[in-house]
Image (spheres, helix red, strand yellow):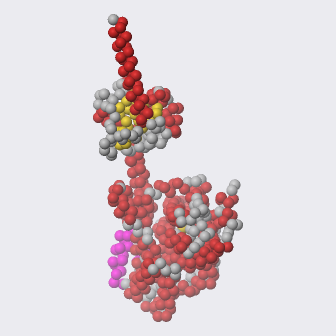
Amino acid sequence: MNLKKNIPILDWFPNYKKEWLKGDLGAGLTVGIMLIPQGIAYAMIAGLPPIYGLYTAMIPQIVYAIFGTSRQLAVGPAAMDSLIVASGVATLAQIGTENFIEFAILLAFMVGFLQVVFGFFKLGFLVNFLSRPVISGFTSAAALIIGLNQLKHLFGVQIMRDNKIQTLVIEVFKHVKEINWITLVIGISSIFILILLKRLKSKVPAALVVVVLGILLVRVFHLEQYGVQILGEIPKGLPDFIVPKFEKNTLIDLFPIALTLSFIAFLEAISVAKAIEIKHTGNKVKPNQELVAIGLGNIVGSFFQAYPSTGGLARTAVNNQAGAKTPLAAIISSLIVGITLLFLTPVFFYLPKAVLAGIIIVAVYSLLDFSTPKELLKYSKIELIILITTLIITATIGIKEGIFIGVMLSLIMLIYRSTKPHFAVLGQVKDTTFYRNVDRFEGLLNTTEDVLIVRFDAQLYFANISFFKDKLEEFVFEKGSKLKLIIIDGESINSIDSSGVFMLKELINKYKNRGIDIDFSGMKGPVRDVLDKSGVIEKIDYSNCFMSIQQAVDAFEDRKINKQIERKYFEYIKQTNR
């Protein structure tokens, strides 16, 4: 067993260079300070007391630093994951209750366990079933839900938490007259400052600036007396070691949301890690090891009262820009959070919830994906429908339902497309040995009326053999009665199953009875092996398999010439015998 491969800290830490420390220290301090308001804010999205956001910002980071392969990924609570936690656990327990907190922590263990299992068995590829339109529709819907749920803090009114936007919009309109205008001004001002500092590309953590300003305003002007809701007391001290409560019924109830979250969290983390990897040579991100690292972070975190965590885009970007060279930056960030837990939690007593709402709204705005729908409108209307359907179902019915329907629609589209792949008749490019689609290229030399050249651009398997047979028959009919040879260019056929084999044998017999031969050209090795072992090549004769289309055409022309010579020879013999 290669320990360095499975525990990457054993690779980078012994080879640590002194010149890296400045970057890691600066990045660690920056992200650590950024994590404090973020952790508190995201805990609010998850329906948990603020302290649990700080626990989640500390423990999983340390574990990831030991087992993770990305040197810049910053792990902790995330907005979308927090929303999924809230929506999933709320079906089992009321938000804010002890049971709700216990279930959220147990969910972290379950998510981590599933991620480690997926990583151990190298099942990271399963995340590919979440197509880009599904991800775009889901994240945009999640952003809308998160943003609308923060309006109660932004307006200072009592609005019931919900994961359906139609319900939230109705609730907002019901309580418009109850808006606390001081709270609204604080929230809007926070959003304005956050956006301004972001556009100015200031190195000062914008979230920390609005937090400090918000606390000072409340303390100086006693705004809590005017109805401005504040965070209140946050317990001091590091998290205790507590074993999550494992109950069979609860595990069964939480499993669907744990499965969903395990994939979503991994997808977020690996997308961010891969994006940062491009900017750093010599640092290879390994998806299956990432699953294990994030999973172990969630498992260990669950024993220290953390809820599910993953890699965050904004934190990772800041970590990278601040000069992080190794995961030591993440360890330093965790220490900053730990120091806050030990000594600084009373500072946040007067923090207005409107400020946290502003931080959340600005953070989730980046989740709204406008570019993907615009692109899909140009070249893939079907995928645009999948995106919109996923968005609408997620926003109006439920998160699990939205993802499930989106994935199912993507699979149906994939299966449908594979049943009717591209199938082209080829013609020769003048003065070359290249052959291209006659419907796409002008000026091609059509082969003689006795030769048909076709290319099938997909695997040949049970779902598309009927399409292959029917389309080929159309091409044969269009070619006419003088057709003597069909050349099947197999350059784009990457696999063939038993149904495809039986279909080819059937076609060979069918066209042979009509005086039409079949040749193969450019077949890939694995396909050629199947055709050889199944007896298909023997059926057409090995001499009728060629490396290129041109060789097949030349061989056919040679056969025609030979037949003409033979015919003339026999005619000559007949005449001389008379």
- Start and end of the magenta stretch? 159-178
Estimate the x, y position of residue 132 in percent, counting from the top left: 43, 59
Front residue (pair 563, 396):
563
Depth check: give the residue in front, 94 or 541. Answer: 541
Q: Residue sitting at 34 percent across and 74 percent down?
A: 170
Q: Residue furthest front?
A: 431
Which part of the image, by quadrant, shows the C terminus?
top left
Name, please, the residue furthest toward the bottom.
221
Q: Going by the image, does 185 lie left or right of 86?
A: left
Residue 24 place in picture, x, y as percent? 61, 74
Q: Number of numbered discs present?
A: 0
x and y percent of residue 313 in the render? Answer: 50, 69
Q: Is residue 84 left or right of residue 336?
A: left
Residue 498's spot in the image, x, y percent? 47, 36
Question: In the rendered view, would you say 266 is above or below 240?
Answer: above
Q: Decide if residue 424 is in sight here.
A: no
Q: Which residue: 35% across, 8% down?
A: 576
Quadrant where the N terminus sits is: bottom right
Instruction: Kindly identify the residue that appears in the image at 41 percent across and 57 percent down.
Output: 405
